[in-house]
Image: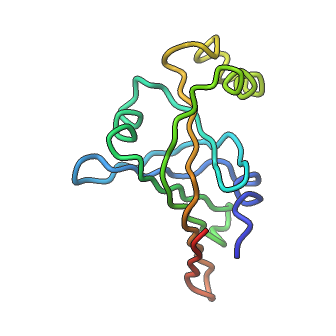
Amino acid sequence: MIDYAEMIKQNPTGVLATRNGDNVDTRVLHSAFTDGNKVYFTTSGEKPMYAQLMVNPNASFCCYPPNYSPVVTLNGKVTFVDDLEFKTRVMEKSEMLKRNYQTPDNPAFKLFYLGVEEVKSYTPGVGTEREEV
């Protein structure tokens, strides 16, 4: 199995897919960190992505190195975290978050994790591998 935590550490920017009614929406998103089978992200509560995840928490995150080998897709459900102490620790590590939200109790500042249930990877010449977590 691919070590997706290391992959994300080396390549934190990827594509997050969410359901938007009968459609799928994708957007480029930067992961904050991993902890076990949880991949943490931040967003604004004012973005369509937040509303989509509140309606349907199923999501998929895809990341890859510059040479696209391997491409890793993580599938699971999203859970929002409203723990002020935890949000404070996350914000302390990011100048961008401080600039965008000023304080961790800003109602627009949303922290969530993708609980990884399935990992898919594609390596050219090898094909696709799938593993349930």
Extreme residue in the bottom direction: 125
Q: Residue at x 35, y 33 (%)?
A: 51
Extreme residue in the left direction: 22
Depicted 39 relative to depicted 65: above or below: above
Q: Residue at x 61, y 42 (%)?
A: 30
User: Position of 18 compared to 31: left or right?
Assistant: left
Depicted 97 relative to depicted 68: above or below: above
Quarter of the image containing the N terminus? bottom right
Residue 102 picture quarter: top right
Depicted 2 relative to depicted 128: above or below: above
User: Position of 53 compared to 115: left or right?
Assistant: left
How many numbered marks does the figure carry? 0
The picture places residue 43, in percent across and down from the top left corner, at 52, 31
Q: How is the image coloured?
A: rainbow
User: Position of 121 compared to 50: left or right?
Assistant: right
The picture places residue 21, in percent across and down from the top left corner, at 23, 48
The picture places residue 25, in percent across and down from the top left corner, at 35, 49
The picture places residue 86, in percent across and down from the top left corner, at 70, 27
Q: Residue at x 66, y 56 (%)?
A: 37
Quarter of the image containing the C terminus? bottom right
Q: Residue at x 39, y 41 (%)?
A: 53
Depicted 74 relative to depicted 43: above or below: below
